[in-house]
Image (spheres, rainbow, N blue to C red):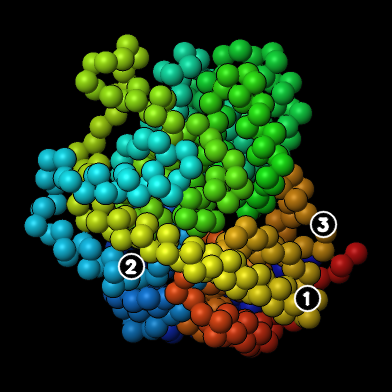
Amino acid sequence: MQDLQNKIDKIQKNIFSDYRKKTIKSKNLFNKLSKKMPGAVSGSFRYFAPYPFYTKSASKSYIVDIDNNKYLDVFSGNGPLLLGHNHPKLLKEINKNKRYGSLPLNPYLLYECSSLINELVPAAEATRFLNTGTEAVMSAVRIARAYTGKSKIVKFHGHYHGQHDEFLIAIDKSKDLFSYGVPKSSVNKVIVQPFNDINSLEKLFKKDSDIAAVIMDAAMHAGGLWGTTRDYLKALRALTNKYGILLIFDEVITGFRLSSGGAQKYYGITPDLCTFAKAMGAGEKIAAVAGKKEIINILDPSGTNNKYVFQSGTVNDGTSALSSTIAALKIYKNLEKQGKYNSINKKALILKNGLMGIFNDIDLPCQINQVGSMLQIFISPRKIDFFKPDKRFSKIVELFYLALINHNIILSLPTSNHIYLSFMHTNNDIKKILSVSKQVLNHYKFDDLKIDKS
């Protein structure tokens, strides 16, 4: 293993060297920003070693950095840029509604936007808009607790539900907190369970009558994109109904990516509540909690119910975000009619199979998880799953992503391992990614890292 580590270190040295030569202005900006911002970034996942690059423009499926390097972008803003960068129909809708100003009082746009969500999303009989996925999850959980009169929430290992203290737990197979600064008392009302195990849930439901809701991400993207099945979701829906527990689909990742109506439409299972975020507005800062009218109406401030739940925010109805959402939802609807969701998923499958072949050809045993148009890469000689991961070779995947950046392709950020195709990506883009992947593995001598498949 030490010999392998020495070879990895040598490859890293060469990749880092080329990256530094390519991104001189980004390095200088990083050094200056480091004195003003922690890590010189505005979010933990935006950082990667030796330092991140900084962008100055973007269009369609391309990003240009401050060193004038032009990259094919398959990271897609960590998922929400399904329509690429600066889609003309989004810009047109935003410009058309400039007359409103940034923060008018209750813009008419609310009606068109909520009507489109109601049309596309099976569970969305009623909707409330917010700014972020974290806020949407917080509101959904508060609604569930108020509606049921119960206090506990079930979440699953490997599922991420935003930055609220209550859910920064069990991102992997442990029940560890995800961050310092989170009091253990914050998660006292959260029960962690294994995903895709209906029997363990039924045992829990039988003995605990204080469970308000189950929340889940159908893609299980944070835990490795292990996904789920319709049969499991159907059983989960029946089980939660049986015990009077609300089912919440966190569709911040799956919403409008798996289908125009999210995972619930894709799998044919309707939850009680669901949450959406930036993909809804094709990258604009907007989110929503939606669901059955009887449940969502607990937010009604008119005084007509006795279990009123407070939820508000100064820019919950910002006009640029609402405008972008209106345009995006119309585009998603038309793309689905044209069969483009099937098309993008097929492109992802071609990319998956091509990459696996390229890695396996140089004796780097590769597994790639796929849910719709999303991929994650794992290197391991073992058969792995969520509860049997193999992190020994994760550095190889990180260096592969940075090597691609050196050759003008952002397949993923090195610290992310999330690949998200957009509707802007063409068959030629897939061919280009595969061709360049083969080149970089050869150029940086990844074939020296042969892993014993035993």
Instruction: Name the amino acid type tagged 2.
Output: Asn
The answer to whether any part of residue 68 appears in the image is yes
Taking the spot 65% from the left edge, 61% from the top edge, the residue there is 370
Q: CA distance from mark 2 to mark 3?
A: 42 Å
Q: Quadrant of the C terminus?
A: bottom right
Residue located at (12% from left, 59% from top): 98
Q: Is residue 330 left or right of residue 198?
A: left
The vertical placement of 415 against 439, above or below, is: above
Q: Which residue is mark 3?
A: 383
Is residue 417 something that shows in the picture?
no
Q: Nearer the viewer, residue 196 or 435?
A: 196
Kind of residue sitting beneath label 1: Asn
Q: Which residue is mark 2?
A: 31
Which residue corresponds to mark 1? 360
Give the mark, 2 or 3, whose residue is nearer the N terminus. Answer: 2
Residue plotted at (67% across, 37% down): 234
Residue 50 lies, with reference to residue 177, above or below; the image says: below
